[in-house]
Amino acid sequence: MRFKIHGMDCAEEVAVLRREVGPLVGGEALLSFDILNGKMTVAPGSTEVSADAVVRAVARTGMRAELWQESKGAPPEGAFWARRGRGILTVTSGLASLGGFLTHAWLAGGFQAALGSEGMGLGHQVPLPAKALYGIGVLSGVWHVLPKAWFAAKRLRPDMNILMSIAIMGAIGINELFEASTVSFLFALSLTLESWSLGRARRAVAALMDLASPTARLLGKDGSEREVPPEEVPVGSAFVVRPGERIPLDGRILRGSSEVNQAPITGESLPVPRNPGDPVFAGTVNGDGALEVECTKPAGDTTLAHIIHMVGEAQGRRAPSEQWVERFARIYTPAVFGCALALLLIPPLLLGGAWGAWTYRALVLLVIGCPCALVISTPVSIVAALAAAARGGVLVKGGVHLETPARLKAIAFDKTGTLTEGKPAVVEVVSLGGHDERELLERAAAMEARSGHPIGRAILAYASAHGVSPRPAEDFRILQGKGATAVFNGKRHWLGSHRYLEELGQETPEVHERLEAMSQAGRTVVVIGDDTHVCGLIAIADAVRPVAAGMIRSLRDSGVHVVMLTGDNAGTARAIAQETGVDEVHAELLPSDKVGVIESLVAKFGQVAMVGDGINDAPAMGRATLGIAMGAAGSDAAIETADVALMADDLSRLPWLIRHSRRTLRVIRQNIVFSLAVKAVFVVLTLAGHASLWSAIAADMGASLLVILNGLRLLRPVS
């Protein structure tokens, strides 16, 4: 079951819901939360519970629940108040407080009379019209606070809502109505700012939903086109995407070629060419060519939908910093109550202090003790950082995984498909016996033209990229397991392996030396010759990604130890290691061996990441501190299994992720230190009698605003 929760704005409300609803449904583990969208999901468990029972349990917390409905068409009734109610009440509280103060000053004979004497106004009479306006200001400000405060009081779990409620009621009790109304307004404004900050982060992620086209051009069997919602396009049917349009669904190109801007999904800065057979994703933008695409996933299961869902769910997975703040608040809030009570009783009873003055100071201490800025400092930063990472093509599965990259001491890479392209490519052409490179490629391409072998395709691709066309050949023959022969200009030529060369007896010491050097470098060599001599050599290898060496250099500069794991032979592994600059190599590994290497790295370095394809390397990724999947776009399994998914095959995002994580931790620490420093200063001022209720809450609100704005800086990702 899924529920829309009204009033769930931060991690504190999530903790309250876990404690209240968890026992009802069979355990807190069955609950997951999407703070961005205000959604609570109850997974099936051993305890059967009705939706009405869950709604009643949520109502006891001061929040409101209703069954989740996907928003389609006109907004539901009451949506305006749900969106704007908090802001309207906050504005009403502020205007009523200002109106009450002005009325009070006008009827009482001046501003000094309206301000009272801060805690000494027990006998001061407030005119009735001003009382009415102050009352409106107080009620409007605490409208959303009182239900939550009452719930916390019944459960004997003091929180910021109780702190504020007691402070406001205490100010009313000592006849400081202006102070009570002002504190109520400023606290409401603080909560509104928190809600606004979450809303901004929510919009940053929800903007992804606007990327998908609202309609799809469904292609009929007779060739006709009709526009339908993407939800109505069946899997396996074809739809048309015109030049410049957004692609509405995940699919595979049937006809047409174009360049597609995949930045919303993969973070790639440049459009990528797409041809028949290539996948395309919902939310990406078609270039200049018209495409006919076969739908491969329903609208609710696209890669874009997965990204939105995973980023939303990530809010329920608290980061270590969030958990620390929550544990601290559990001790801190009762301690504030105890200190305020001591400040209220000890000076008047033991030191002969005035009850009115020390009651006021105790109320000020309650206000400045409110952990609002402290509690919101971390979630806002985490949400903003997760949203920025998602926009950059890096899907992080929760705050707990967002902080880990900053602490990594070692990263292990799978070789094939991660550090390398994962497919053979020509890396060197060696001409011998007076022949040139173009001539070799013409003959090799001709003999490989009918081959479906990956090595043959690599030679053809290399020749095509260099503008070389196959030379006309006669009497073409395939030598099974050896190579091929063909006649060019009346002369027979052959193409084959080192072993076939040895069978022909044409290997010279010079050729043998070259072949051995290439083999030790991890390359597969194709030999080309005629009846008299060897014409040349073509070296094939799994090419290293162009950005790999620079990426590894950046990681090492950041103090990260880089390891390569591969099932390939030691010679190939050493060659790749030398080219990329990794610190440590482990070759000829089975999947179980990779797990063993990761365990030894964790024992040695503590914090270790494993980078792989998210499927074949799943055991090793699961054993590492952080599992990172490469090129996860379109792969549901990779997105689900990894802690972090790089949506494109872009290794440069790894150093960026580490920088982003370290920046996030810096911002969180700045916010925590600043919040506590403000409180420490005002505690001293309160004990000295130089702090007032309204100045305390203004300082707390100012601190809240500053930590919010500081956290929202993370929405702008650095390069």
Image (cartoon, grey):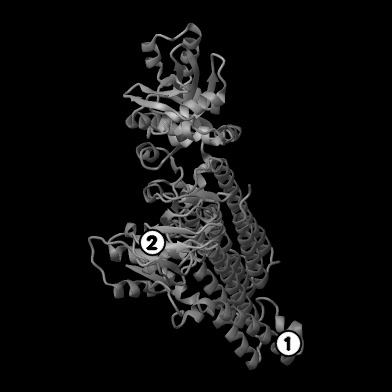
Q: Nearer the viewer, residue 432 or 60?
A: 432
Name which quarter of the figure residue 139 lies in: bottom right
Name which quarter of the figure residue 592 lies in: top left
- 327 versus 18 height, above or below: above
Query: Left or right: 640 with respect to 166?
Result: left
- 319 versus 496 height, above or below: below
The N terminus sits in image quarter: bottom left
Q: Earlier in the sequence, mark 1 or mark 2?
A: 1
- Judge whether residue 565 can be spotted in this image: no
Q: Residue furthest top?
A: 509
Disc 1 marks which residue? 105
Point 67% across, 78% down: residue? 120
Point 53% across, 79% down: residue? 85
**Disc 1, SS:** helix
- Judge whether residue 233 can be spotted in this image: yes
Query: Left or right: 136 with respect to 60?
Result: right
- 621 versus 428 height, above or below: below
Residue 181 percent location from the top left of the image: 61, 80
Amino acid type, callout 1 = Ala
Tell me the distance, in whole angstroms, between the alpha carbons under discs 1 and 2: 73 Å
Residue 704 percent location from the top left of the image: 61, 63
Amino acid type, callout 2 = Ala
For the residue carrying disc 2, how many other residues have a C-alpha within 10 Å: few (<14), some (14-19), or many (20+)? many
Residue 186 percent location from the top left of the image: 62, 73
Q: Nearer the viewer, residue 455 or 185?
A: 455
**Disc 2, SS:** strand
- Nearest-to-viewer mark from 1 and 2: 2
Residue 470 percent location from the top left of the image: 49, 32
Number of the label disc, if any, that sits on residue 291 = none
Disc 2 marks which residue? 238
**Dots 1, 2 in contact, CB < 8 A:** no
